[in-house]
Image: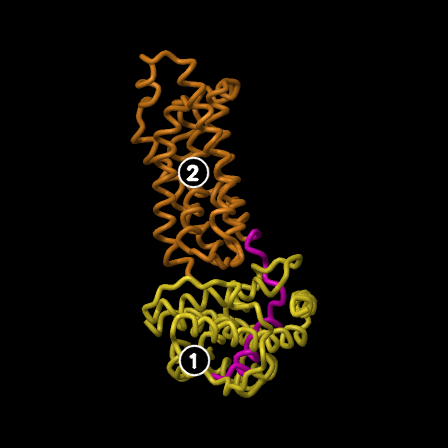
Chain colours: A orange, B yellow
Amino acid sequence: MRTDELINTLVADHAAQPGPKPVGHGLVMAIIGGLAISYALFSLTLGVRPDFISALGTWRYDMKLGVNLVLMIAATWVALRLSRPTATSLTAMRALMVPVLLLLAAVLYELVTVSVSAWPSRAMGVNGVMCVASILFLSLLPLTATIYALRQGAPTSPAVMGAVGGLLAGSLGATVFAMHCTNDSPLFVAIWYALAIGLMSIFGLLVGKRALRW
Amino acid sequence: MEQQRAQDRDRIWVEWMRAANAGDEIAYRRLLEALAPLLRQVVRRGFAHSGFGNCDVEDVVQETLLAIHLKRQTWDEDEALTPWVTAIARHKLIDSLRRRGRHIELPIDDLIDVLPAEIPTERLSSRDAERLLSVLTDRQRDVVRAISIEGMSAREAADRLRMSEGAVRVALHRGLSALAVSCRDLDQ
């Protein structure tokens, strides 16, 4: 094919759809849709903890919800930046330090205020494995939606983009799961939530490596 | 001096791209035609850096034009166009070199510091066009041929192929997406 012939087809295709929607549009739809699906699955299986309202009044619970929400927002922001070909991964990813530092501060505060003998029970909680499994369960469909939306982007590194998509979906699932979970210690969150979200990120990386190539 | 010229040039390109996003086809064509020589130069330099000849320059130029088109939603109307275009060209260049078994770091500044000189070239992709088009369905191939080679509009292609204009547009868009995928995978 000659280059001017190719340009003919590109111009004709452009005429059919002059200004395609920006990546952010699809990504926001994926997040809203992902939250809806995740919450529907959550209501059918786990359900909101009975003392949800009174738990909202405790700093530990607010911190648990807050860290996940902040990570979700930070991951969305980073994903949007990385979807542009001119972005450099390292500078764009700095926003992820915000939820990490927030969680670290909460962990430190917990370690200082709670006696050493109580550390293990706080960290292990009631059932960490169930927590990880639930978050993965609640994150998988949102990850599919997220990766699908990110296919509109042009990331320099599809693998990194996928990993950030995994963080986004994982923190979304974790935010929903946090409404059920009664292990509120930052120690528990730093181990089990982080493990689940980390697994989602690795999974996103593996999927993104292929699915986000362009 | 040269920098000033590059800035002026970018300002015009940004205007064309904005006009194109607002529905101006002529501006879009003008832009793509203006970008082709820049891309040729970027790709040539990239190949030279990595010790390849100019064998498949036009292949990569075309893949980049296709990527620019399919990813045009990632350009922000407030940013310059040249860095965005060269970032896409660089990505396609690295991809193409990787398929040839080379892994190299391309210093982007070296690729764009000079204004493109018009280099005579046949502008024909060396890749077998028929082999490339073979990934398309019959219908997509008919549409792509009518529009690319015969220069028809979607409307004219629809009349000729007895399809609705909407169906032509869908077939064209899917065909282009399939071409982008096959450029990546066929050479492997």
- Vertically, is B18 above or below A45? below
Q: Amino acid at mark 2?
A: Gly
Q: Which mark is residue B54?
A: 1
Q: Position of residue B81 (x, y in %)?
A: 61, 64
Q: Which residue is mark 2?
A: A173
User: Which residue is drawn at the image coordinates 39% and 84% (left, top)?
Assistant: B128
Q: Which residues are magenta?
A: A1-25
User: Which residue is drawn at the image coordinates 47% and 85% (left, top)?
Assistant: B124
Subunit bearing disc 1: B
Q: Nearer the viewer, residue A89 or B30?
A: A89
Frontmost of labels 1 and 2 is 1
- Vertically, is A121 above or below A210? above
Subunit bearing disc 2: A
Quarter of the image with the C terminus of chain A is bottom left
Label 2: how many residues lie within 10 Å, few (<14), some (14-19) or many (20+)? many
Label 1: how many residues lie within 10 Å, few (<14), some (14-19) or many (20+)? some
User: Which residue is drawn at the image coordinates 50% and 52% (left, top)?
Assistant: A88
SS at badge 2: helix
Q: Nearer the viewer, residue B82 or B111?
A: B111
* Relative side of A201 to A67, left or right: left
* Quadrant position of residue B51: bottom left
Please give the count of numbered marks on the rendered protein.
2
Cα separation, mark 1 vs mark 2, equals 50 Å
- Vertically, is A91 above or below B171? above
Q: Position of residue B93 (x, y in %)?
A: 44, 69
* Discs 1 and 2 lie in a common subunit: no
